Image (cartoon, grey):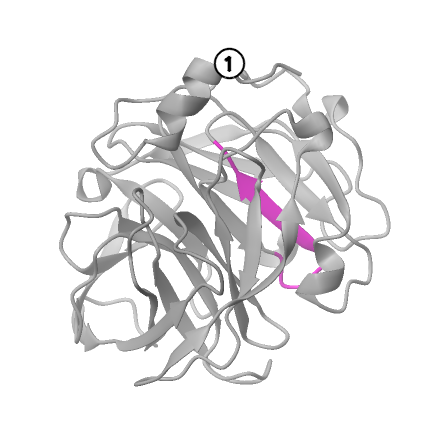
Amino acid sequence: MRRLAPVLLAGLWCACSSSKPVTSPQESAPDAGGLFAPATGLPGCRLYGEPRQTGTVPPELGELSGLAASARHPGIFWAHNDSDNAFRVFAMEDSGKIRATLTLTGSTPRDIEDIAVGPCEPRAEAPPCIYLADIGDNFQRRDQARIYRLPEPEQIVDATLPVEALAFTYPDAPHNAESLIIDARTGRLAVITKTPESLGDVYALDGLSPGERVKARKLGTLHAPQDVDRLTTGADLNASGERLLLRTYTRVWEVRRPKAQSLEELITGEVAEVPGASQAQSEAIAFTPGDRGYLLGSEFAGQPLYRTECR
């Protein structure tokens, strides 16, 4: 594995929506699944196969920053743009076809960086909500960050919908972050910071409520083996709570902990590299329904969308 050069790290640390494309040096191998450690004792793929292009990022998502599989609509991924764009969420197929546009009201975001779908309430049986993470803070100056919540629509049609704003602060100092995850078993939310020191610090967002501002709680820090990679730009938590995908500019990692009962347990598990694909400004990742793989997106229109399935 290659180490990121200091100059490259510095450039990536400052990356934002106006950055030039950053292309991964990692190319998919003819049999990508055979190059990576198998996952044993876990639901889902034991080995992932070679990423396969399914389409391209559509013009509407020229600054695609987050992806999340729909809980209600098979084959649909919710997607959004980075900062300085209209407050909208798109229902997209893995081909890049846009099926519907949700125009959102009720708040003015600053820098939405990721999206997740999970229970609207802290119980697995609750109806699904879409969560948008307004957590980007390149200069680490924000006095608070926010999560926006809205019920996942029952129909895939264009609509204008209100959001609830859920505010939080960090317990130490402001942080830049681009990753949001939700535990489907409990509805518990967490963010993962974007830092040049590691794959990120994990902060739980317990007790979020409209009109309140809660304090995040640090659960721990994620590290790649030998610290060969840093700067997590996107993440997704498996429905089982036993697998966590992390996207960086150059690789894809999976945190694995069989029978993990909580985020605290999961983040102490193995961190293993899994197949990635060469994309400019790699910032989006989402597990596919049924735990059979994941979708990779890029922040530039026309870039390939890649789907990785079980080997």
Pick whichever, 285 or 268, lies toward us. Answer: 268
Pick whichever, 189 or 136, lies toward us. Answer: 136
Residue 213 in the image: x percent, y percent? 37, 78
Residue 304 in the image: x percent, y percent? 37, 28
Number of dots carrying numbers: 1
Residue 296 lies, with reference to residue 265, above or below; the image says above
Kindly state the secondary structure of the residue where label 1 is placed.
loop
Image quarter (top left, top right, bottom left or bottom right) of the C terminus: top right
The image quadrant of residue 199 is top right
Residue 158 in the image: x percent, y percent? 18, 66
The amino acid type, in three-letter code, at marker 1 is Ala
- Which residue is farthest front? 172
Q: Residue at x 20, y 59 (%)?
A: 88
Q: Residues within 10 Å of mark 1 (few under 14, many from 20)?
A: few
Pick whichever, 130 or 146, lies toward us. Answer: 146
The image quadrant of residue 39 is top right
Q: Residue at x 66, y 23 (%)?
A: 32
Is residue 70 at all visible to an observer of this figure?
no
Q: Which residue is mark 1?
A: 5
Describe residue 20's horizontal placement relative to residue 147 as left or right.
Answer: left
Q: Which residues are magenta?
A: 238-248
Q: Is-magenta flag for residue 72?
A: no
